[in-house]
Image: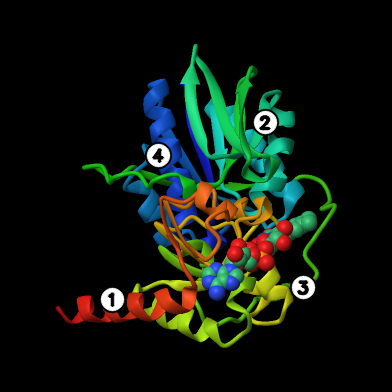
Amino acid sequence: MSRVIGIIFSSAGYDRAAQGVTGAGRRLADALGLPLQMVVVGGGGGDLAGSLAAVADAVTVLTVTGVADYQPEQTLAALTDLCRGEGAQAVLLGNDTWSQELAPRLAHRLGGSAAGDGVELVIADGRLRVSRSVYGGKAMATIELLRDPAVVWIRARAFDPATAREVPAPIESLEAAPTGEPATFIIERKSEVTGEARLEDAQVIVSGGRGLGGPEPFTDLQDLAGLLGGQTAASRAACDSGWCPPSWQVGQTGRKVAPGLYLAVAIRGASQHLAGISEAKTIAAINNDPDALIFKHCRFGIVEDYRKVLPLLRERLAAMRKE
Ligand SMILES: Cc1cc2nc3c(=O)[nH]c(=O)nc-3n(C[C@H](O)[C@H](O)[C@H](O)COP(=O)(O)OP(=O)(O)OC[C@H]3O[C@@H](n4cnc5c(N)ncnc54)[C@H](O)[C@@H]3O)c2cc1C
């Protein structure tokens, strides 16, 4: 029987991205009337496999003998066999580097079609249509995938998680034999140590731009973000000025975030910045220029000098916390 297959790399755990892939997979499988099989690639999938079993119809923990780390060719060969064997009609992956690298290669080997960067998946006339943002977020493109299986990597956090089912799915382990010599391997891994949670997972982001005029106001933004249980980010102009770490940069060449609330303070709203916040549920802005581009994209806007607004906001939020 054919099915929808979702692929998760075990190194990430059941984070918001894995939840998004599973949620998108669940809805796609339901729309097609097919079962959803989640595949955990790599060892140590215990907790992750258990979380996936709560929302999928079947879970497979896939390892390649002797391959502890991600190995593109070996993993690709094992996944190709699995997808063929299970009769995959659609395959979904997240937007991590491995998934983006793997998706088109997997589609090619399966004789299917591929698309990437999907933020919406729709079945129309029996075919999968994938929508994604183009031209730095100025327009949306919809791509129809004509050949099955459709292999798509999605902006996982743009999709809601699936709700748990009454009976958890069975979990099976599958060990594949390595095929051929590896063509590439990882020489070194370096983790970024920021002491903060990932911006991509933040539910509230208070972000500052060049209009703040210097590094000091970022302390106020951090304060405000703290009251909202969120994190602080910045435009490229603010990062390039050295007012905050480069890891805070949101946009086309920075982080792609998907918070419930994105508050842009003294940020103009250049298309390159907007490209990083297209998945934010609600955008709010404080800017002293009524013609600032950001106001065309936000739900709530305050035309005012941020120095007047921030203390009032802070005061009100602190009072609300005490109530
Ligand atoms: C290839 C490429 C990639 C890029 N990638 C990114 C990216 O990933 N992320 C990114 O952010 N940018 C990116 N940029 C840069 C982008 O084009 C903009 O230059 C940048 O986003 C501008 O940042 P800003 O809005 O903070 O600054 P500005 O454009 O200088 O805007 C400052 C804003 O603050 C307002 N302001 C000033 N004073 C006050 C005040 N007292 N109170 C309230 N408001 C005030 C002004 O009205 C203005 O709207 C990229 C550019 C290129 C060419």
Question: Does 127 sit above or below residue 216?
Answer: above
Mark toward the viewer: 4 or 2: 2
Which residue matches tag 4? 58
Ligand 1, seen in the image, is in the quarter at bottom right
Res. 234 in view? no
Query: Marks 1 and 4: CB-CB under 8 Å?
Result: no
Residue type (three-letter) at the residue carrying disc 3 = Glu
Question: Does 221 sit above or below residue 165?
Answer: below
Mark toward the viewer: 1 or 3: 1
Mark 1 vs 2, N-terminal side: 2
The 10 Å Cα crowd at callout 1, few under 14, some 14 to 19, many 20 or more, is some
Is 150 situated left or right of 306 in this image? right
Mark 1 vs 4, N-terminal side: 4
Measured in 3D between alpha carbons, the distance from the residue under mark 1 to the one under mark 3, in whole angstroms, is 45 Å
Mark 2: secondary structure:
strand
The 10 Å Cα crowd at callout 3, few under 14, some 14 to 19, many 20 or more, is few
Mark 1: secondary structure:
helix
